Image (spheres, grey):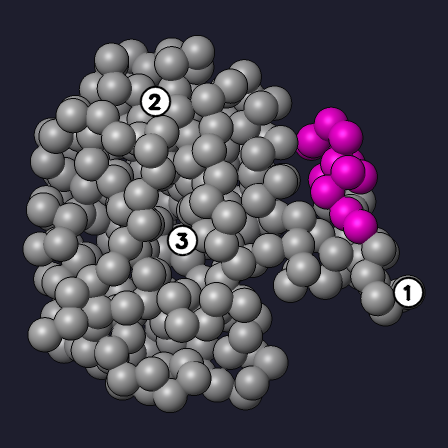
Amino acid sequence: MNTPVYLTSESLNHPSIRHGFFTRLGGVSQGLQDDSHDDLAVSYHTGLEIDEVTINRTRVQEAFGAKFVSAKQVHGAKVINVKRYWDPLNPPVADGLVTSQRALGIGVLTADCVPVLFADSTAGVVGACHGGWRSLREGIIEATIAEMEKKGGLRERIIAVIGPCLGIKSYEVGHDFPANFKGTLKHYRSLFIPSENPEKLMFDLPLAANGFLKQAGLEKIDILDFDTLTNKDRFFSHRRATRLGQPDLGRQISIIAVN
């Protein structure tokens, strides 16, 4: 049996914290993208067979070493304080999760959007949020940090790690797109560089997440520099699937927990 593969950040390597940015490797889903036959797809809400997803999520749980929950993500800014495990087939709606419950992982699902994991090991509180450009604009990062503060977290102590997402060389947008961040992020124009197509710009999604983290007062930030579109052997990518006319069924998960 293939073992699920996940990435970690040295910034979050602490005895009281466990975390993992899982890849698409080590599952049982068949041929979702690029004719792979061992995909670790973990979302119940993309049309996959329930049994396959359940097996994949069980493998993630075994590799991570704790139960975990994820929410139904809608590109908004709602954050939930997670106090107990819930039915994965009927999750609440949220794009951010926070918990201080021990050995209960909180996870976010992505396939180009940016996953951000947070931890204040002193307060014993962790967070996770799903950062598409809409949820970033709507304030998901600030909302997640604010919820952590309710649990005793302090901005000067919170560590944030930006996980694999669509990179600047893969994220082409129109010239009207930068206006989405006007009034919400300082220096937002620095997120864009010219495209080879004069009618387009290239958007730096991880830099946008980093900008919102800094704007929220966080100083301890790490970025895992992996482009989900170009690293096809490691990650699902919504944009890659769309370009290739493949089913957009795969989602990887990023999880964090208090030990």
Residue 182 within the segment the image draws in magenta: yes
Which amino acid type is shown beneath numbered disc 1? Pro
Q: Nearer the viewer, mark 3 or mark 2?
A: 2
Residue 168 appears left or right of 66 = right
Which quarter of the figure is the C terminus placed in?
top left
Closer to the chain start, of discs 3 and 2, is 3
Marks 3/2: CA–CA distance:
19 Å
- In the rendered image of this protein, does residue 170 appear above or below residue 39? above
Query: Is disc 3 placed on a helix, strand or loop?
Result: loop
Check residue 73 in the rendering and tell me which mark sits there, or answer none: 3
Q: Position of residue 1 (x, y in %)?
A: 10, 74
Which amino acid type is shown beneath numbered disc 3? Gln
| Residue 53 in sight here | no
- Circle 1 residue: 198
For disc 2, the neighbor class at 10 Å (few under 14, some 14 to 19, many from 20) is: many
Residue 138 appears left or right of 186 = left
Query: Is disc 1 placed on a helix, strand or loop?
Result: loop
Residue at 25 percent across and 19 percent down: it is 121
Magenta residues span: 181-193
Q: Nearer the viewer, mark 1 or mark 3?
A: 1
- Circle 2 residue: 148
Q: Position of residue 192 (x, y in %)?
A: 77, 47
Residue 102 within the segment the image draws in magenta: no
Q: Position of residue 87 (x, y in %)?
A: 15, 55
